[in-house]
Amino acid sequence: MNNQELISNYYITHLDELLAFTSRRLRGNGEAADIVQDAFVRLLTCGKMISDVTLPGLAYTILRNLITDFYRHHTSRNEYEHYLRYAAHNVETAESVLSVREITEQMERGMARLPEGSKRIYRMHVLNDMRVSEISQTTGEGYKWVENRLGIARKAVRNYLRHVS
């Protein structure tokens, strides 16, 4: 039996099981069928030797990797940052003004908990819309150091905002 026949038989036999696995990890997201389909396309196009023994492990590994990619690409960095950056420029109603003001106040409280260097970097990134490379040049610090501090600051502010909300 060649690879294509083996993969086709496995697909027919285990499709429901793989869809359930993927759907559970995506928390019911409708993308499960697409991700399973992509996994089998990858299986069919990979040039590796596949056998009855290796196919299940390979299929689940590819599915896990695709699920991880899905979360990486489809999860927003931080709802509050995006809202503050983009919605603040297009404010039309009184509720929007209050909402932006409340979010800004909460972010300020979250930033107040940060060390001074991280606070300055986070403020430059979020409020001044500066990139890591620009912040690095402005502060004279290394790119990786700025990137690391910004990541720590984002995580701290995000955790604070989750607990406040």
Image (spheres, helix red, strand yellow):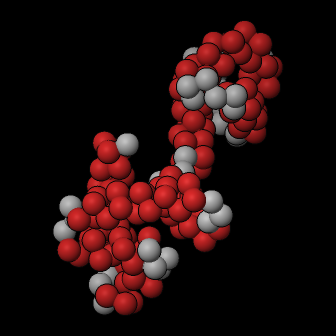
Give the quarter of the figure containing the N terminus. Answer: top right
Q: Is residue 48 left or right of residue 128?
A: right
Q: Give the camera-side residue of 117 and 53.
A: 117
Q: Is residue 95 above or below residue 115?
A: above
- x 46%, y 79%: residue: 128
Give the quarter of the figure containing the C terminus. Answer: top left
- x 20%, y 74%: residue: 116
Q: What is the total number of numbered labels drawn onto the structure image?
A: 0
Q: Give the camera-side residue of 28 and 64.
A: 28
Q: Give the camera-side residue of 154 and 42.
A: 154
Q: Is residue 40 above or below residue 66?
A: above
Q: Is residue 35 left or right of residue 123?
A: right
Q: Is residue 156 above or below residue 54?
A: below
Query: x and y percent of residue 90 in the render?
Result: 65, 68
Query: x and y percent of residue 162 in the render?
Result: 36, 44
Q: Give the camera-side residue of 151 and 94.
A: 94
In the image, farthest residue toward the top: 13
Query: x and y percent of residue 2 in the render?
Result: 78, 23
Q: Is residue 145 left or right of residue 34?
A: left
Query: x and y percent of residue 123 in the render?
Result: 36, 74
| Residue 132 is at least partly visible in this image | no
- x 62%, y 59%: residue: 93
| Residue 55 is at least partly visible in this image | yes
Quadrant assignment, res 120 = bottom left
Q: Is residue 92 above or below residue 60?
A: below
Q: Is residue 124 left or right of residue 9?
A: left
Quadrant assignment, res 152 = bottom left
- x 69%, y 32%: residue: 31
In the image, farthest residue toward the front: 94
